[in-house]
Amino acid sequence: MARPGWLVAGAVGVALGALVGAAGGWWLAPDLAGESAPARDVAVSQASKPDSPDDGLLQLDVLRLRLEEEVARRKALERRLAERGHEAVPVPSAGEEAEPQVGDDWIDADVLARGGFTTSEIQDLRARFEAIELEKLYLRDQATREGWNSKPRYARQMRELDARYGALREVFGDEAYDWILYASGRKNRVVVQRVMEASEAAGVGFEAGDVFLRYDDQRVFDPQALQRATNDGEAGRTVQVEVLREGEVVHLYPARGPLGIALLTQRSEPVRPRY
């Protein structure tokens, strides 16, 4: 099955979770914005000196966007090579965009059908995705032509466009949104990679391999949302967390605040867990 072509358009967040995880995972603590300290320090050292803390964060977003676009471009080339066998495919030079693969693979209709979406809903979703991705293509073109594709302005506007995907969660609900993420090639699972000794997570029984389902009755689809959830509300108050462990739901009861775990993200087809 062909992977969604919108990845080639440089959609945010598709490849970064795996890459960050390979570099050491996401340490879930309030002083980190969803990144490991080494990965953050490297990014900061490569970025120009920010005028303000907000500009510094946006410059990190620019670096993420560039990395994700390069990974998506390479994956598109690998897919085209696989589809054409040994036929030679020209490799774009640095800074050159790979040709977007438009058509039915912006979002996988077969996957959505398995998730219970009707034909009209699938058509509506495809139209929404294409509209957003076209705006991102035009934004990237404009920023490149005018020379501000490495500025915080570019990252900010890209982030605003990506936020429109999150609005689909309000329209369709959590369960359907899970299928939308999976059908569009996005990561939709947050997995415990490591548990720090003497941490809150270790004390309540978190284990490597646990997949987050809910934190304080909120569905978890990405590390940033989990980070915000641990920071919100009354610190130290006991909350219920649902994780998937070997196909079964396990309930854990940590205190709200830093958990002390390293996280990975992955893409998994939604399944109904066993309670």
Image (cartoon, grey):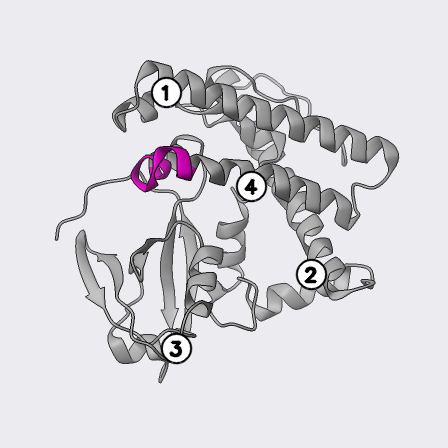
| Residue 176 covered by magenta stretch | yes
Q: Which residue is mark 4?
A: 163
Secondary structure of the residue carrying numbered label 1? helix
Mark with earlier residue (4, 2): 2
- Residue 242 is situated, as x and y percent measured from the top left of the image, at 25, 60
Q: Is residue 192 left or right of residue 224?
A: left
- Residue 121 is situated, as x and y percent measured from the top left of the image, at 37, 20
Report the span colored magenta. 169-178
* Residue 13 image-quadrant placement: top right
Mark with earlier residue (3, 2): 2
Kind of residue at disc 2:
Ala
Q: Which residue is mark 2?
A: 43
Q: Which residue is mark 1?
A: 121
Q: Is residue 236 left or right of residue 90?
A: left
Tell me whether the residue at label 4 lies in contact with that at label 1, contact meaning CB atoms closer than 8 angstroms. no
Look at 87% across and 34% down and name the residue there.
146
| Magenta stretch, overall SS | helix
Kind of residue at disc 3:
Met
Mark with earlier residue (1, 3): 1
Q: Which residue is mark 3?
A: 196
Tell me whether the residue at label 1 lies in contact with that at label 3, contact meaning CB atoms closer than 8 angstroms. no
Q: Residues within 10 Å of mark 4 (few under 14, many from 20)?
A: few
Residue that protrudes farthest toward the bottom in the picture: 198
Mark with earlier residue (4, 3): 4
The CA span between labels 4 and 1 is 20 Å
Residue that protrudes farthest toward the right in the picture: 146
Along the line of sight, the residue nearer the viewer: 247 or 71: 247
Seen in the picture, residue 252 relative to 181 is either above or below; the reply is below
Tell me whether the residue at label 2 lies in contact with that at label 1, contact meaning CB atoms closer than 8 angstroms. no
Look at 53% across and 62% down and name the residue there.
34
Q: Is residue 213 visible?
A: no
Front of the two marks 2 and 1: 1
